[in-house]
Image (tube, rainbow, N blue to C red):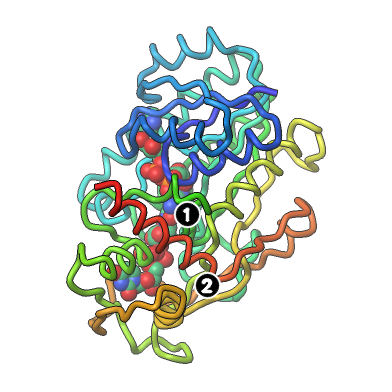
Amino acid sequence: MKILVTGGTGYIGSHTVVELQKKGFEVIIVDNLSNSFANVVDKIEQISGIRPAFEEFDLTDPGSTSDFFERNNDLDGIIHFAAYKAVGESVNDPLKYYRNNIGSLINILANMKTYGIENLVFSSSCTVYGQPEILPVSEDSPILQAMSPYGNTKQISEEIITDTSLVTNVKAILLRYFNPIGAHDSALIGELPLGVPNNLVPFITQTAIGIRPLLRVFGSDYNTHDGTAIRDYIHVVDLAQAHVVAVERMINHAGKKKIEIFNLGTGNGFSVLEVIHSFEKVSNEKLNYQIVDRRPGDVEIVYADTSFANDELGWKAQKTLDEMMLSAWNWEKALKTKK
Ligand code: NAD
Ligand code: WQD
């Protein structure tokens, strides 16, 4: 079984390639390296013992994309990770986000239609729910007005895929990730934020290792037990394994509808302070942090109702918060030794 993984040298993509290989899938990665490095292919090979095929080109380019599909028209499925993901940057440069995230998706769907490729797994996000009224948030919660152009690209992408499935053989599983963190146990692959990280966990590990002087905790006046905002953090390897299950479900025709949507989280909400305390415990480091004002656009509390994914996919996230933080810390330390 041959799977195209777009964005396969990126953070979640690279972990998914490893899990696919473990299950015997043949993988082809396409990535333009706009937010990752070619040596990730070597790291994947080091972990799995198998070197995935890799082609470097931009999926927004219709010519390169159709040339690729002409040569690879026998794909059993596609996992489409390739996208830009920085929320703040998307506010300042919305066209960059619409062009890349929507343009690449359209090119992929057009070629799926041309070559009769049926199975698509798409990276969506819990950001489509905004601040849900009912918690935990289930898949049928209303989609709220997007808080950023990035979030809007995910909403629009879900609609484009759904519309396309109505008039072609394309089927899709839309996976709405909550907050992916952590790294592979080998510490050979992990998240590589370029520049100053926006996300909490890379900011914590970079502060602890001395790259950043201080972590700012955004807001302590939320309506939560300790006043800091609550999220559903999920280990990237748990997340990666859910993609393998999703691909298998599609290939085995086990899906119940042409478009299926699953939340991928643990179902547990943790506050920013709880994340910091977990980090301090597993790393034995004291973190320098300071409480500051809320970050504009942040939601107060969001965590997943995972029952649908657990029941239908037979998948459940396994790793604890402490395990997530330890793997993130081991990855940060491994990066330092390489410098
Ligand atoms: P990432 O930036 O590490 O990986 C994305 C990869 O796609 C990168 O390697 C990048 O070089 C590549 N890419 C981007 N545009 C491309 C293009 N036009 N052509 C070819 N390659 C291209 O990001 P990630 O964290 O692994 O995220 C993967 C997917 O999951 C994205 O769609 C993202 O929006 C989604 N997602 C991520 C999170 C998160 O917190 N990390 C949460 C929810 C959803
Ligand atoms: C988590 C918590 C911050 C940094 C973002 C995207 C979302 C999705 C996942 C892609 C929040 C607090 C953070 C810091 C802090 N990505 N924080 N100090 O905001 O839940 O979601 O990534 O789809 O679309 O918006 O994740 O890691 O940025 O923040 O106090 O320096 O940590 O306020 O409460 P978020 P995050």
The local secondary structure at tag 1 comes to: loop
Q: Residue at x 50, y 77 (%)?
A: 270
Q: Amino acid at mark 2?
A: Asp
User: Disc 1 marks which residue?
Assistant: 183
In the displayed structure image, the side of residue 241 where residue 193 appears, left or right: left
Which of 69/207 is in front?
Answer: 207
In the displayed structure image, the side of residue 303 where residue 63 appears, left or right: left
In the displayed structure image, the side of residue 248 where residue 35 appears, left or right: left
Which of 81/54 is in front?
Answer: 54
Q: Determine which of the numbered discs, if any, sits on residue 322 in the image.
A: 2
Measuring from the top left, give residue 312's x and y in whole percent: 78, 53
Up-down relation of residue 93 to residue 141 (above or below): above
The local secondary structure at tag 2 comes to: helix
Which of 325/337 is in front?
Answer: 337
Q: Amino acid at mark 1?
A: Ala
Up-down relation of residue 44 to residue 317 (above or below): above
Separation (CA) of disc 1 from disc 2: 12 Å
Measuring from the top left, give residue 57's x and y in whole percent: 36, 21
Q: Are marks 1 and 2 in contact (CB under 8 Å)?
A: no
Question: Is ligand 2 less than 8 Å from the beta carbon at label 2?
Answer: no
Q: Is residue 77 visible?
A: yes
